[in-house]
Image (cartoon, rainbow, N blue to C red):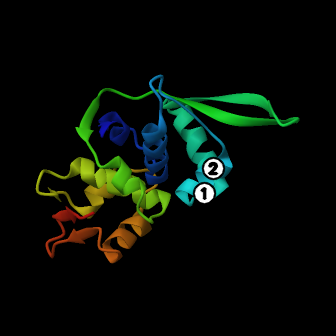
Amino acid sequence: MKFPSGVFHLQLSASEVGLFAYLYLLKNREYRVCITYSELEKRLGAHRPLLVKSIKNLEKKGLLSVVKLYFRYKEVFSHRNCYHLIAPISEDPDLPLKEVLSQDLSLQEKGLLLYLFYLAGEEGDTFKTKTEILSAFKPRPHKAFKSLVEKGYVQVSRTGVKVVVKL
């Protein structure tokens, strides 16, 4: 699936990249997604404070705008958040969004894994050091990187410059 590569150049946290990717996967033609925090918590396995913080940061950085949609259902008033995605630059690389987002990983791990797929060539290799890779995020997701290595999604060579992404 095409994905806006500009997201990887905005100094986002790995959680913000993962959340943006998930919302991007759910978007309609008008780049809108209507979903509750509870649904996001269930689907992404992330805690509400992390989701709220990530959404606010994405909004501050101009990647999405939030509109509350109020409605009445079975005599009860309720609301949902509707997110209008503002995709930066163009939809460049073909990334395995569905495959990565369906894995049993934390939101940070998903965002980092998507970035590694973005960096990887056709062979699944990227010749960057761990430090170069992690410096794309603020804060740097050291634990998420270590976890991806332990789970076998990423392999680091002895020289520390080759990362092989496996899904």
Residue 143: where, in percent of width, then height? 43, 69
Q: What kind of residue is marked 2?
A: Glu
Q: What kind of residue is marked 1?
A: Lys
> Which residue is nearer to you in this view: 152 or 42?
42
Q: Quadrant of residue 151?
A: bottom left
Q: Is residue 87 left or right of residue 33?
A: left
Residue 161: where, in percent of width, then height? 16, 64
Note whether 138 is above or below 105 in the view shown: above
Marks 1 and 2 in Cβ contact (< 8 Å): yes
Q: Residue furthest left?
A: 123
Q: Which residue is mark 1?
A: 42
Residue neighbourhood size for the residue with mark 2, other residues' Cα within 10 Å, grouped as few (<14), some (14–19), many (≥20): few
Give the SS element for disc 2: helix
Position of the N terminus by quadrant: top left
Residue 84: where, in percent of width, then height? 54, 27
Q: Residue furthest right?
A: 75
Q: Residue at x 48, y 39 (%)?
A: 26
Q: Quadrant of residue 78?
A: top right
Residue 33: where, in percent of width, then height? 55, 34
Note whether 18 is above or below 164 in the view shown: above
Q: Residue at x 45, y 66 (%)?
A: 104
Give the SS element for disc 1: helix
Quote the CA–CA distance across marks 1 and 2. 5 Å
Q: Which residue is mark 2?
A: 39
Q: Residue at x 41, y 57 (%)?
A: 110
Q: Is residue 51 left or right of residue 152?
A: right
Q: Residue furthest front?
A: 74
Residue neighbourhood size for the residue with mark 1, other residues' Cα within 10 Å, grouped as few (<14), some (14–19), many (≥20): few
> Which residue is nearer to you in this view: 67 or 144?
67
